[in-house]
Amino acid sequence: MLMLALSGMRTRWITFVGSFVALALGVGLIAATGLALAATFDAPERGPERFAAAPVVVRAADHLRVDTPTGTRTKPLDHPGPVGPRTVDRLAALGRTVEDRTFPADVTAAPTGPDAKAARSGADAKQRRTGPDVTAALTGPDAKAARIGADAKQPRTGPDVTAARTGADAGKSRPGQDAEARVGHPWPVAAAAPYRLTSGRAPAAPGEVVVTTRPGGAPLRTGDRVLVRTPAGNGPRTVVGTVAGRGFEDAVFFTDDEAARISPDIDALVVHADATAVRRALGPDSGMDVLTGHDRRRADPDPDRDSRALVSVNALLGTAAGITLFVSAAVVASTFSFAVAQRRREFGLLRTAGATPGQIRRTVCAEAVLVGVLASAAGVWLGAEGAPLLVGRMTGAGLAPPWFALGDASWPLHTAFWTGVFVATAGALVSCHRAGRTAPTEALREAAVDSRVMPASRWAAAVLVLLAGLGLPALALAVDPGDLLGRKSYITRPMLLVVGFALLAPVLVRPVGRLLTWLPARLSGATGVLVRENTAAGVRRTAAVAAPVLITVALAATLTGTVATLEEARAAESRTATTADFVVTSGQEGRPMAPAFVERARAVEGAVVSVSRSTAVTVLEEDTALVTSEARAVDPARLAAVSELPVTAGRLSDLDDGAIVVNEEWLTTRVGDRVTVWLGDGRKASLRIAAVLATGTGDNGVYVTRRNAGGAGVDRIDVKVAEGADRRAVAAALQSAGAATGTRVTTRAEWLAATGPGTNDQTRTGLRMILGIALLCTATALANTLVMATSDRVRDLAVLRLAGATAPQVLRLVAAEAVVAVGVGAVLGGVVAAVNLLVVWGALVLLGVMSAVVVPWGTLGLVVAAAALLAAVSAVLPASLALRTRPVELAGARE
């Protein structure tokens, strides 16, 4: 069998070259994405940064811990509390302590001349006042806004720390200058990193600061005058010293007293004492974490940033690897199936010569294993070489963090190799099973025209797969429509329908082909008729060309269409829910809004101001799992004036400090029932359900009052112009307040445009990468199949030439047949995409969102046009080479 297999491979080398290339490329893509995916499983190990030189760090517990019947469950807290004064006093008796505070401190080069006076006007000048107003701005719940919370302690570093724009003129000292996002600390805590002075001295008086420097950052030097914007206001300060940056933050250091004035809460405490003594002094139920050794990293700014950055990379590469495996397996199986189908005459001759069905199967299996092993080995080499290029493109496009790199895992290469061998063998076995059991005379007769192309087993498989592809979404629509909007669902769901339609392709090719060729067949000339008849006669050839196009069109339309439809649905929800005339956000994720702006906005005459805070609530579901939901803390009296939320039960006006507004995804949704929740700072509360919101696209979260905000700072303000008030005057007052505090004020239309469809470039880039992989597989499969098919039709082309057709006419016929086959695949892929998009639309309707389905016509047009062009070229090139031989010689050729 091995010698016979080698002889067959030498004789039909074109067929096996096509299968080899398709399989090698598929294995290469699987290996490359697998190697990159393996690198996302473990974030790089980093030691303590901010407190690397601190012996013991004490801070409030940053995780909620709840005992359940199945064990202790934990969840990160949205806003851990500060270290209390009693704790500080207790630990001070053990040894020297250093208080750490973290708060926004954005730096701008100080203006000179007339601009200097203007930069200190308005709200900033008010910060110099004394009395209750200043105290109110720095104490109480809003004092929490003077620092970056546990989850907001994420000062961006490296290339991400660029000039942070906050509006056309907002926050600028003079045109062309922007604030550089930094964080503030008291100078004594600098030694815990440790930071060392590279020039100047330590700050000794209010108005003096020390700044970190880094390559590519603002060129600050000792003696410079700068404007520093903090939660307590803006003001000029003198740089009296510089320290070299350590890469994890860009910092501004103040005197201890001034840092305490800006941010009264103590975020962490460095204790120079024995850790055991510290734990003993605090006791087991203090609510404090005592961090030593590697655990000190938990007190760093955003200690989980590396792991969190890899979550999206893992999801993207996991999706890409899954789609790559699916598409590669499908096109390779299709290529091998067509290659075996081309050899029916050969199998018939072998059966006539006395070969048994088992011998034919073993021969084909041996050939498939040989091709599979060689192609898989080549694919593994391609994957190993291509993986660094893939990682480089991902980091360059912002899909992965700059430090992302390949590891030393080898299992993806083994997985890709054996996957390739299995796919090659399985694809050949499925196709050769029928050839092995066909009678010799029947095989010889079927070699001319495809007649019975669907055995009963294939019919059964197709029906079962289609029933699953249609039944599962129908069940989800009836039980949980929101589940259909998840990424895993809308990425995996099309695959069942794709497989089902691919299995039915031999049956669907004739009717779809006749539909596409109906008009050309009625035009003058024989080309249209010949295209129609050749498409109907060569069912296997047409199905083999249509299969990869079907897969690519279905995936392209479903993925891009679903994402665009969901974006449009969210935009529609925002347009409906937000009725404010102006929407003001903090502009930087995780940072609270300047208290000075909040104060001035509330004082604007003719404005209805709704201040809200981003927080979270956690609930224990079924006594087994902690589930955290995003929430907003609002003023119920003002909420109705600036929004129209989709209330399905209850009333928003009933929201108070003892109540909560939930959505329909919660287990308990009956108005008046009480739910036990844990707030963002870990406090446990029993709240009454005041109202229930429709689930929508998932953005309809939970609403609580300010008292239950868990210490969160204001990060959004919705402003409605009161009836009869001057809109221009309100806008001017808001813009003035924003310019004085570095806060961007946007109109409702501007805010909707900034958060509307098409704004997530990272998602679109990831989709383009996934579709690019699918297109590459499709292009290879198309080229291979058409080269194999055209090379096998040299006698048909010769007969046309002998019948009087010119060479250009023959080439046009071949190109037209290839384009029609692509059209068949595009139609079937369009049907799959239409079904999936209708499922998404139905889910949105059931969830209460009325939004149109967005069809990506541009993407579909490009995919189909590229496939048609490639198919025409791949068919015409081998045909033109074959036509160079005399027709009489080709007509007498034997296989």
Image (cartoon, rainbow, N blue to C red):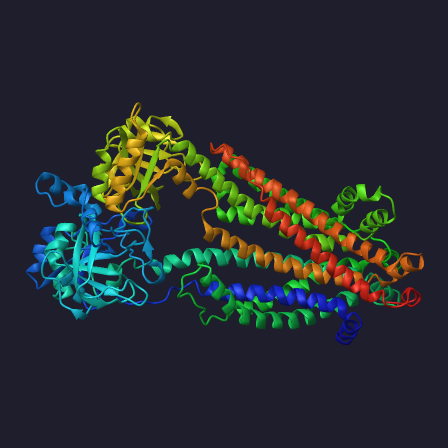
Residue sticking out furthest to the bottom: 3
Q: Residue at x 40, y 61 (%)?
A: 401
Left or right, 545 with reference to 288: right
Left or right, 875 with reference to 854: right
> In which image quadrant can residue 375 be found?
bottom right
> In which image quadrant can residue 254 be found?
bottom left
Residue 695 in sight: no
Residue sticking out furthest to the top: 724
The quadrant of the picture occupied by the C terminus is bottom right
Residue 215 locus on image (x, y percent): 31, 68
Q: Nearer the viewer, residue 717 or 391?
A: 717
Residue 810 in sight: yes
Give the number of callouts.
Answer: 0
Residue 329 locus on image (x, y percent): 63, 59
Residue 579 locus on image (x, y percent): 37, 31
The quadrant of the picture occupied by the N terminus is bottom right
Q: Nearer the viewer, residue 85 or 255?
A: 255
> In which image quadrant can residue 705 be found?
top left
Q: Residue at x 34, y 35 (%)?
A: 582
Left or right, 197 with reference to 721: left
Q: Residue at x 93, y 60 (%)?
A: 802
700 up-or-down from 641: above or below: below
Residue sticking out furthest to the front: 113
Residue 323 locus on image (x, y percent): 57, 56
149 up-or-down from 522: above or below: below
Q: Nearer the viewer, residue 551 or 762?
A: 762
